[in-house]
Each structure stands twice: as structure tokens, then as C-alpha cells.
Amino acid sequence: MVLSQTCIMLEGTKLLELKLMFSTTLIDEDNGCDKNQHTRTIYERWSLASRNLRSGECQFKMATHMARFRSWNRAHSFGIVAYRRYSSGGGYPNISLSSPLPGMPKPVFASVDEREKYETKVTTLENGLRVASQNKFGQFCTIGVLVNSGSRHEAKFPSGISHFLEKLAFSSTAQYGSKDEILLTLEKHGGICDCQTSRDTTMYAISAEVKGLDTVVDLLADAVLQPRLTDEEIEMTRMAVRFELEDLNMRPDPEPLLTEMIHAAAYRGNTVGLPRFCPADNVEKIDRTLLHTYLKSYYTPERMVLAGVGIEHEQLVACARKYLLGKKPVWGASTPGNVDRSVAGYTGGIIKAEKDMSDVSLGPTPIPELTHIMIGLESCSFLEDEFIPFAVLNMLMGGGGSFSAGGPGKGMFTRLYLNVLNRHHWMYNATSYHHSYEDSGLLCIHASADPRQVREMVEIITREFIQMGGTPGEMELERAKTQLKSMLMMNLESRPVIFEDVGRQVLATSKRKLPHELCELISNVTASDIKRVTTKMLRSKPAVAALGDLTEMPSYEHIQTALSSKDGRLPRMYRLFR
């Protein structure tokens, strides 16, 4: 019997061809060959052919599925040729995904009334509490209480009370026995909580699911008006405050310390010049009685705003009436007569702190020893018309670190980059900041360099202040305005940022300027506006903060003279011995 060459073809397709080759064997009964051995050989070859056939069928099925994917180009897999198929199907051949289908009507998109889309609604309750909200698409909301209370209001109290209240926030209350119980309650609604204090505002905030609104507002009311403030919690807060003070002095970036120092120098012993962080000497002085006395004066309904983003205004007002309108504070009746209503008085001056910065940042890539200088001048409050030109001026100055990360829009064409960092390789940092409050403001420049270059660094910064008084170029002004508008709109894409913006504006003015209104004000700023506000700013006395090795630090009088000159240069110093 002869087994000839066999070809097995899968019918119905030209994509797959499987060839099984067998050698022919002539079995001659007369030659004395072992028939059993030949039979076993034939059986083994047929078994191998069957396995190859099954494998080929699997490959064929797999290739059939893969060929259906639209993104396939002409590909060769498993010996199969597959052609790209378009998303439009067989009825619309060769139409790419980016092209509209012929004969199909144009889609009609739903539109929302612009006023309804961006409107911030404000309602004042009978007790003076203001409720402000802005709806936003999504399943989560951010709700919080902002209080007109901060470190600037501690003139009649030991400094540090606001710092303590920030650490004590969302601890045990009348309804909740511990902070863990509060966190577990929020977890049921996917929520998180936080409290932040500044020089003029204390903010309690919760982000959670919209369906948990009642629980969130009830918890907020309890945390703000009925905290227990147990001895154990106050003692734990003392430990946390001490640790934070130590951490501030050990950070490689001393910007928080310099900000404290520049405010203390600019507003010597009054309002926003009071310490934001609790001084080490006051940690043991603050107790529950002192905290209750402070809360009784400042935590009153007319000094509060309940703000919400991502929630219907009517729902938030209903919750405010239910949980905040009739809730009695744990400290009893308020005493609004003790409120400090002092107006910020700008004084100018200098605060220096000699400090060894050589061991601040250790590790495989330690930061070199630097001396940090911050020089500031009085600007304006955020309630004045000059606030927007000052914001544009701050963006025009820009700046940053020599190795700070960033990309397009970082501000590489701002003045502090072009005139300072790009021209002086030994400058490690040069950044402009603008702090604004309801009755004053401060525009300052922070610079850092090697201690041997301190005098030259100070002169470079004073020259930049003097050059602010000139008329800015058209291109750099437009770039600064565009960057400011871009930063404003990008920040307002975040729900917590919208919440803070709504709360702060309503707390200060009982209304809110919408983003497009602010963009219009920014667009209307002219070069003459920049020159006008800068000329006014340069008349004020400088505020100076210095930290590090100050051996080469010029005197305050020399800095003041440089800022009064035409070129911003420091007076020349002549030494008998060099």
C-alpha cells in the first residue's frame, strides 16, 4: 500500500493553507520488513498531522477576529493577510474617522444659558449667615464654612490661637466622639475634610458625594460650633504645633519663614504683621478657656459664609436653615464688642535672622549654602481698582528657580528670568509675590544666592524695582495679561478652588465677580496703569527680610537709598583694608 503526498486545504477561505507532508512508504510483504513497525510510523505521522490541523484552525479563528479590528493596516500574521477596515463600514468605504459621513444631518448640541451656567447665588439668613453656591456638573460637591477670623485678629490674645484651631478642627464634637468617627462617617459618602487658616480667614471644607449633603452640612455645623476641645486634644495639638515649628526651621525652602518675616517687617506689630504660626513661647499659654473666649468673639453668624460648589442653591439654603440657623455654640452667647477692627498700618522696616544654612539640605544632592533676601513695597488691597494692575505687574515680573520644572506658559520671558536668572548664573532663585488683604497689600521679590554675592544680589533686586517704574513694552504686557488670564481660568477648573474663590469673595464683599468679568478687567489694563501703580508703590518705605549668612548684607538705609535713586544702585562702600 502506498501513502502518497497529501494536501489538506481549509475550504471556503484563501487566507490559510496548511500543508501536511508525509513520505511515501512501500510496504512489501515479500521483503521481510516488520509490518508492525511501519504501521506505528504511519499512525504517529497521522497523529502529528491532526494536531497541526487543529492548531491551524485555532490560528485561523484568531486571525479572523483580529482582522475585524478597525485599526489594522495591511498586516501579515500567522501567514494571513488582513486589510484595514474603516469605522464607517461597507456602506461608506474609505472614509476616515475624522471625516463626517455624507448625507448625515449635523449634530445639534444642547446649550445652557450663560448667566445660569456661571451665576453665583447668595442668600442671607435671618441670623446674618450668608449662603453662597455655584452649581457644577458632577456627582461630588465641595461644601465649607469660611470665617472672618485669622492671625490678624489676635491683637487682644496671645498669637497662635488660629494655628491651634486649625489643628483642632474636625476633632471630637457634641455628636461625634472622635476624629476617627468623623472620618468614618465621611468615608460612607466618599468624603474628605480639611481646615486651613490664613492671616484673615479660617476655612473648614468637606468634599463628598452630592447625595450626602445633609450629613456634610450637619457635620460642618457640629465641627464649627460645637467642638469639645478636650484636654487630651489640646495637648496633642501642642505637640503637633511644636513639630511644625521645628519642621519650618529645617526645610530647604525657607519661603514660609521669609513670608512671616516680611509681614512682620512691613506691618510692625499690627494686624497682618502678627505671627501666623504660634510662637514657641505661646504654645503652653493657649488652653480651652482662651480658645472659647476667642471663639465667642469671632465665630458669629454675621462673620461666616456657608459656600458650596456642585450643589443646587435651594438645597444648600434648606440645609443651612436646618442645621446652622438654630444651633447654639458650645461657648455660649457671642460678644461681638471684643472684635478687633484695626486697619492695617504699613510701617516698613527690616528683620534679619543669622542662620547657618550649610546643613539644611543633606543627602546625595545637597542644596548649596544660600542666603535668602526678600524685599517688598506696599501695594493695595483687593477691594481697590488698582488690584488688577498690581496682579498684572506681579505676573510681568514672574520669576522662579534656576532649576524649577515647567513648560510652555511657565514664564521664561518674564523680567526676573530675562534680566536676573539668565544674566547672573550665581543667582539660585528670583521670584515675585503679591499678598493682598482687605485694607493693604505687599508686593515683594524673593532672591537667593551664595553668601559672598549678597550685596550684588540686593542691588540687582533694587534695580528691578526701579525699572518697574518705566513704561512696559507692548509685547511683555500682553504676554503678562494672557498668562494671568490663563492661570486664572486653569485654576478655576478645580472644584475646591472655585469653592475658595466663591467663599472669600462673598465673605469680603457679599458678592462674586465672575471669571469673565475678571478677564475683561485684566484685558483693560494698560501700560499707563502699570506705570501709575508702580510710581505710587515706589514711594513707600521698603520692607526687608534676610535669612542666612548676612556678613555681606547691606544696611537698611543703603537699600532705602537705592530704591530712592534713579538707577537702583547701592551707595559705594570704601574700605581701608581689603
Image (tube, grey):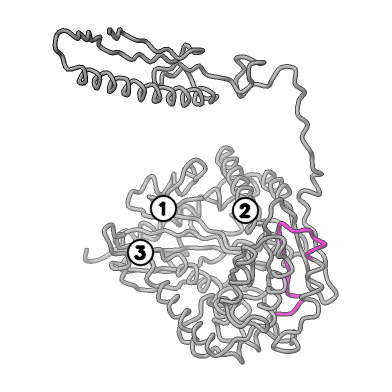
Residue range corresponding to the magenta coloring: 299-316
CA neighbours of label 1 inside 10 A, class few (<14), some (14 to 19), many (20+): some
> For residue 575, which numbered disc appears in the image?
none
| Callouts 2 and 1 close, C-beta under 8 Å | no
Residue type at mark 2 is Ser
Report the residue at 67% width, 84% height from top: 174
Quadrant position of the C terminus in the picture: bottom left
In this rendered view, identify the residue nearer to me: 361 or 184. 184
Query: Which residue ends up furthest to the left in the rendered image?
Result: 32
CA gap between label 2 and label 1 equals: 26 Å
Residue picked out by circle 3: 371
Residue 401's tag is 1
* Secondary structure of the residue carrying numbered label 1: strand
Amino acid type, mark 3: Thr
Local crowd size for mark 2, using a 10 Å CA cut-off: few (<14), some (14–19), many (≥20): few
Q: Nearer the viewer, residue 573 or 60?
A: 60
Cα separation between marks 2 and 3: 36 Å
Discs 2, 3 touching: Cβ within 8 Å: no
> Residue 125 appears at what percent x and percent y?
83, 72
In primary-sequence order, the first of circles 1 and 3 is 3
Element type at mark 2: loop
